[in-house]
Image (spheres, rainbow, N blue to C red):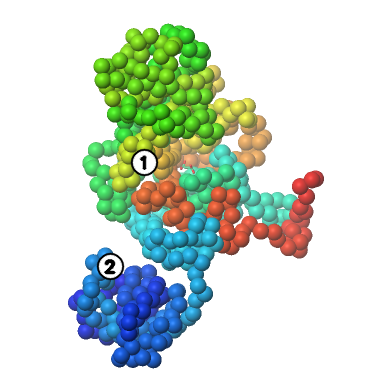
Amino acid sequence: MYRTKTCGELRISDAGKEVTLAGWVQRTRKMGGMTFVDIRDRYGITQIVFNEETDKELCDKANKLGREYVVQIVGKVNERYNKNPKMPTGDIEIIASKLNILNKSLVPPFTIEENTDGGDDIRMKYRYLDLRRSNVRANLELRHKFCLAVRSFLDSKGFLEIETPVLVGSTPEGARDFIVPSRMNPGQFYALPQSPQTLKQLLMVAGMDRYFQIVKCFRDEDLRADRQPEFTQIDCEMSYVEQDDIIRIFEEMTKYLFKEVRNYDLGDEPFIRMPWIEAMTRFGSDKPDMRFGMEFVELMDILRGSGDFAVFNEAEYIGGICAKGCASYTRKQLDELTNFVKSPQIGAKGLVYARVQEDKTVKSSIDKFYSQEIMTKVAEKMSAEPGDLILIISGPDAMKARKQLCELRLEMGNRLGLRDKNKFALLWVVDFPMFEWSEEEQRLMAMHHPFTAPKPCDIPKLDTDPSNVLADAYDMVCNGVEVGGGSIRIHDAVLQAKIFEVLGFTPEKAQEQFGFLMNAFKYGAPPHGGLAYGLDRFVSLFAGLDSIRDCIAFPKNNSGRDVMLDAPSAVDQSQLDELKLSLCSDSE
Ligand code: ASP
């Protein structure tokens, strides 16, 4: 036996026992004639003691151990004189009688401790060492527990976990596909699924009734902290359901996961359901962070045309937020906020601010354009009190201005400590528009995906007023993060063809790309709907992480590279030849 116990399990009640442990050397300390070695495995750290007086040879061997050596130790559990209350095994130590070096290690490129000196790049290059750190490992443990709880909940509700293929055809879900050349079909390509969307719908046509899958999805998009080129979904679909049925079951699952995995009680109340338009108006976002208020107040009626300020007089939107107790913000802090909203990522033209003073008068950065009476009206409409700071954003494009104000609200939330990672605020955003206009493509695009059903009452508008058609779609939002989203699907071939037409597909193109689905709908497709959760995002929220990378064993960096495997990489000419592919140089 390599070991009789792990490095995390011995307690004072084990004192006197003879044990064998195996693990990695975390560190060694020599103090006089004693040598202390901490050894680590997945379960914890245990202190081993070597005594020069009792066994010099053994102690000399221990003194030569390097960091990350793999060792096996036999010894007796002893109550410690100096206990360490911070360690679960801190009451005991092992008096070593044998030391067996199972493997040596090079000096690791960074310290393998909770707070490491390794930067991101080096940790990713040596991810297998990074994963030895207890906090990184804890994220993977949490992910495991999360998946187990998902499977057990969905199984209890009759869902079947069914695998779908990874080599498929292109599924247009708004992102670019990753494509894979086919050797057996030269000149033809598979696409990796952006999600198993059409396949799960076909499983409903096949009568599976309730499907789920914890599944990899692939999207060739520009990356951000909460995006990876390959990520994992909890993908679900149900037959004979309406929006309410889906919301009910997945709300129950969410409450179960929070309780089981995070020990957090979301209470008995149903989550808020907020129409998309309301979310945009009150928070400038389709994924509002509801941990705090600071809701938008529209100020067009008061500020446009009532002063000599061209920016406001030409604006299509003027809105403000009220930061409680922030009137004392210094010039420097206000400049920081102004620079923040003017940064290229946010793109606002400027920031107007107003302080409500003790005597209720308002002192603002636009005093020369507006009377005190107007500014008092602003403060009143915003329910601002003495000591509060009003921040106003405007713009010629209402949606853009709202999004900018949203970023400012989130920034203020951060600054005021209102976005506590241990607090969770969930809601459903519902009634999304069916389509959005793409400037780039000069056509309507599906806001969710083209298989989403329009609200039945809006179907007649598909011909006359498609921009105002609402979809039977819903997103689950937690702390300003879209954790899941889905829709009721179209199950009628004629309506599906109509949607493709609105999206600008010719009947031939629609048939070529989606013939398989529309044909399947002709063989008795049941009404169905579903949703998918972003597993990485959900787990990151549970773990309080800033980036989804930290809960993925082997993530890719911002340029989509796996720096450990050094992928992607060039392939041999012979491989290209076999695939009948040739590369053109940049200049061609
Ligand atoms: N396939 C969708 C997505 O990946 C989710 C769904 O509609 O079920 O966003």
For the C terminus, give its image quadrant.
Answer: top right
- Picture layout, residue 381 above or below residue 125: above
- Picture layout, residue 298 above or below residue 181: above
Residue 154 shows up from this direction: no
Q: Secondary structure at mark 1?
A: strand
Instruction: Name which quarter of the figure residue 33 lies in.
Output: bottom left
Q: Earlier in the sequence, mark 1 or mark 2?
A: 2
* Residue at the image point whose x is 43% and y is 66% from the top: 112
* Residue at the image point whose x is 47% and y is 53% from the top: 549
Instruction: Name which quarter of the figure residue 475 lies in.
Output: top left
Label 1–label 2 contact, CB within 8 A = no
Identified by mark 2, the residue type is Met
Q: Position of residue 354 (x, y in %)?
A: 37, 21
Q: Secondary structure at mark 2?
A: loop
Q: Which residue is mark 2?
A: 87
- Picture layout, residue 249 above or below residue 578: above
For the N terminus, give its image quadrant.
Answer: bottom left
**Farthest residue, direction left:** 13
Within 8 Å: ligand 1 and the Cβ of disc 2? no
> Mark 1 or mark 2, which is nearer to you?
2
**Farthest residue, direction front:** 32
Kindly report the distance in space between the C-alpha atoms of the residues bearing marks 1 and 2. Answer: 34 Å
Within 8 Å: ligand 1 and the Cβ of disc 1? no
Q: Which mark is residue 478?
A: 1
Q: Position of residue 344 (x, y in %)?
A: 55, 33
* Residue at the image point whose x is 50% and y is 63% from the top: 127
Identified by mark 1, the residue type is Cys
Q: Position of residue 250 (x, y in %)?
A: 34, 44
* Residue at the image point whose x is 33% and y is 32% from the top: 273
Nearest the camera: 97 or 387? 387
